[in-house]
Amino acid sequence: MTATLALTGSMLIGAADVRGRGKEIRGVDPATGQELEPGYGLGDESDVDRAVSLAWQAFPVYRATSLRARSAFLATVADNIDALGDTLVARVVAETGIPAPRVRGELARTTNQLRLFASVVADGRFLGARLDTPDPDRTPLPKPDLRQRKVPLGPVAVFSASNFPLAFSVAGGDTASALAAGAPVVVKAHSAHPGTSELVGRAIRAAVQAHDLPEGVFSLLFGDGRGLGTALVKHPRIAAVGFTGSRSGGLALVAAAQSRPVPIPVYAEMSSVNPVILLPGALASSGASLGTEFVASLTTSAGQLCTNPGLVFALGDPTGFLAAAGEAVKAAPGAAMLNTAIHKSYVAGFTRLVDAAGVTEVAVGGTDDAIAACGQAGLFVTDGDTFLAEHALQEEVFGAASLVVRVRDLAQLERILDTLEGQLTATVHADESDHDTVAALLPRLELLAGRVLYGGWPTGVEVGHAVVHGGPFPATSTPATTSVGTLAIERWQRPVSYQNVPDALLPEELRDGNPLGIPRLRDGAAE
Amino acid sequence: MTATLALTGSMLIGAADVRGRGKEIRGVDPATGQELEPGYGLGDESDVDRAVSLAWQAFPVYRATSLRARSAFLATVADNIDALGDTLVARVVAETGIPAPRVRGELARTTNQLRLFASVVADGRFLGARLDTPDPDRTPLPKPDLRQRKVPLGPVAVFSASNFPLAFSVAGGDTASALAAGAPVVVKAHSAHPGTSELVGRAIRAAVQAHDLPEGVFSLLFGDGRGLGTALVKHPRIAAVGFTGSRSGGLALVAAAQSRPVPIPVYAEMSSVNPVILLPGALASSGASLGTEFVASLTTSAGQLCTNPGLVFALGDPTGFLAAAGEAVKAAPGAAMLNTAIHKSYVAGFTRLVDAAGVTEVAVGGTDDAIAACGQAGLFVTDGDTFLAEHALQEEVFGAASLVVRVRDLAQLERILDTLEGQLTATVHADESDHDTVAALLPRLELLAGRVLYGGWPTGVEVGHAVVHGGPFPATSTPATTSVGTLAIERWQRPVSYQNVPDALLPEELRDGNPLGIPRLRDGAAE
């Protein structure tokens, strides 16, 4: 397949390759600072209109595909991406500096995720079919025949993330779940990995064509976030938006979506510092090993993960933890960050910690002059009073820097938890002797975060049915949703009720006798 | 019980009766224009803060109640309201002019709804419990133990509706579903029925006390929408808002909620004209009877229902329909509207139809000088070209006025459907000969509305598991939800995932062996 995959620098608008007429951008190898071929011309509003109009045309056909056909399509998308193999891995490495082994893992996660949604579609539970038994003889009024199922909202705009060039980008969780729901997708590629985006986009397009689906089921655009991105969100035929990225970027899209004549939902996954709580028993029994494990999590992907543990609260004596963590940080080599903008912002955040009153440096990691955008790990420590007095200390520093807070007692920890903003994750490390404390903390942690971990580290999100990758604002703009896992499909759906519609005219999934054999509720219970 | 129910004119803030220090308001009998005792002092921001602070204090205790205890509490609320009986019915009639038989029906619907949510709570499916089987031996990384359930968002603010003083007010669907989810509720009463609100509020408070729940589980405030209402939405401890009412009122709350440092969801059910489509076969075979039935639906509750059929599209010859509908409208007596503000706004909308170019009056109903705020039914007719040219013709006229549009052909009907705003309902009347047309129209109708009816009329919403009372903007601010039926509970919930949490520390509903015996998913399938 590799031979046919020469990159063209074009957007993919339905079946057409369209060269953007705006400024040209190129991928940049963050390790060397070298620009990569080809150049990509940025698109404009007319490209948005063309892509969304095709998506709107495709919508009635695509959403009417059978569960089997749609499931097979998603499986083909996965197969096509897997078939890119080393070609894709090499391009991701070149554009992002992410080490090849992690890219391979992310590639497997991405295609497994597509196959998981293929199975969700085939199963049919996501349709939320509900039937209420009518009663024509009820007085004073007959009870109608009501049946309910979910329909897709309409064409979806997906904004790719910088830090997951595969799993949260062109064929990532937003795209996979929207396609599964029956919604055509228009992706705005992230400008930091245009070649990766084109490769994956072509794999999706090939699947659209192989399954004889309307070309508008998928388009890929390159463009400026403020210009093309805003035009995409404001297009009247776009029904919902998925986004993973910075708080400022997410909030700008939310504002654009709300200023439309018809506002639409934006599912933005934004920022999180992922607090980790170390309880006295755990610190005493395994402080040193926790310190080492912690730094492994902190420095994964140069700390550029939304679930990176950026805040640690130590209740009890952290001496052993800090000593081991400090050693591990010192031993951490400098690592290429995703791009120069992220590197610059990381250096600023790092410096803020260095300069903060009442905050002490525990250790800093290595650096490497041969790497252009080199991120240096850093570990800092402060006390609970200082943390409570300075709100800025809970701001995310996107990269491998973390702050350990020595907490005086449980009351202070609870006060701190009350001041924290919403989070993607909250982790507690405990041994048996800490269990009463854990029991007291869990109700607070579950109101703070979308995922609560006992032991382990927040990095590494398992894709499945029971996962939540979401959480209260500002972790996400819509706390009742998740952007990872099968529940993510609900973001693109809306329930519709059918009253007294004759069987032959009903959607198949609601007909008498359940011809599709999908899970349904009858009068509130499993049928 | 009646003897103990003297109205006091107080707000109910937790267990305390609090007299608002603001302007005094009174209920007004819309039939006579007479003011009703007692006066109610309006509250201010300090009352909001007291009520919400109590709700916040109550939250951890209330959300931790067992399913059985919470279910029993909801049933007691229903019993207490039923026990008010004729005292309540008489007060509703006096404050709203709604005829006693409809009030009795609404009372039954309100308490049935509370009992339905009591059964939903007892069943436990609403918790959305999901478990993924771990695999400690998986390589390269072990698969964690992930379990998910939904938790309530936090204290909820509910804004009462004018037109359903029971079913969409103090103990209406928003309150019932929020209490069921485990969220304390602070209600802002509608100023048009303060006495009704106090009676129902005391019934809820008595249930809170009978079940030894924290007083903050329920409070009832009186106040100005702009002042007290905005303060309620902006209070940092309010987590979500339910509203039924006008478009301008709903959008003002949405804007207030979005301007908070931490934005929160507003579930606003706003405006809908509920298009009814009459197909040629149905018009030919039963035009006259449809005309009579239509006017019965149109004039129910003086047309003051969010599902009132305000627009009719006739494809085919509507002569018989119009003749019968015209007769029925002429025979419709004038009816007391809910209050003078609604009456004034109805007269303005009615006049707009009378004056609209290309719109002809078919018939107007009777009027009654003895009724102060008397609504007069009205039926108007136009053609498809005029309708397409004048967007204002699709604006809601809240009351018993409707517009019949003669549509040239199916293509014009489809063009019209494309221009319509989102709706709560869409209805099609057809006979067998129309079924191909129905099949072609249904996919459009389900994207237009939350509930699609085949035959019948949109007024009269059945409360059950499969109903949707919602729909695309501006029918609601959040199209993926319903404000009626058991799915309404999801508006107040958020999923949380628990990773590797020891069994003894997990919420009971997620423990091994399913000790609560609730419906759960294991690896995506029913356990």
Image: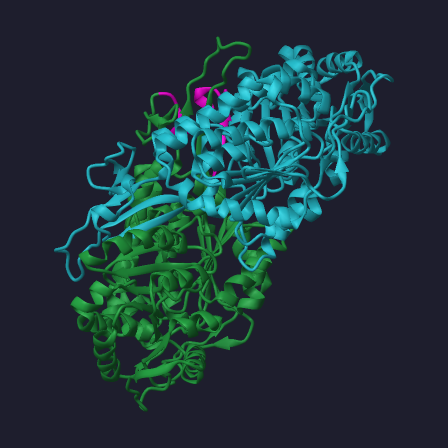
Chain colours: A cyan, B green
Identify the residue at horizontal 44%, vertical 41% (top origin). Answer: B63
Question: Taking the image as drawn, is residue B24 in sight?
Answer: yes
Quick check: A512 left or right of B57?
A: left
Quick check: A234 left or right of A515?
A: right
Residue A142 is situated, as x and y percent measured from the top left of the image, at: 17, 57
Q: Which residues are magenta?
A: B493-512
Residue B416: quadrant of the picture? bottom left
Identify the residue at horizontal 30%, vertical 29% (top origin). Answer: B517
Q: Nearer the viewer, residue A221 or B518?
A: A221
Identify the residue at horizontal 27%, vertical 40% (top origin). Answer: A508
For residue A516, above or below residue B101: above
Residue B497 is situated, as x and y percent measured from the top left of the image, at: 49, 29
For residue A228, above or below residue B519: below
User: From this viewpoint, which residue is outermost toward the left?
Assistant: A137
Q: Nearer the viewer, residue B450 or B134?
A: B450
The reply to whether the magenta stretch includes residue A61 is no
Quick check: A35 left or right of B216?
A: right
Question: Taking the image as drawn, is residue A524 in sight?
Answer: no
Residue A198 is situated, as x and y percent measured from the top left of the image, at: 63, 30
Number of numbered discs visible in the structure rendering? 0
Q: Quadrant of the N terminus of chain A?
A: top right
The reply to whether the magenta stretch includes residue B503 is yes
Q: Nearer the viewer, residue A360 or B405?
A: B405
Residue A391: quadrant of the picture? top right
Q: Nearer the viewer, residue B173 or B3?
A: B173
User: From this viewpoint, which residue is outermost toward the bottom?
Assistant: B369
Q: Quadrant of the C terminus of chain A?
A: top left
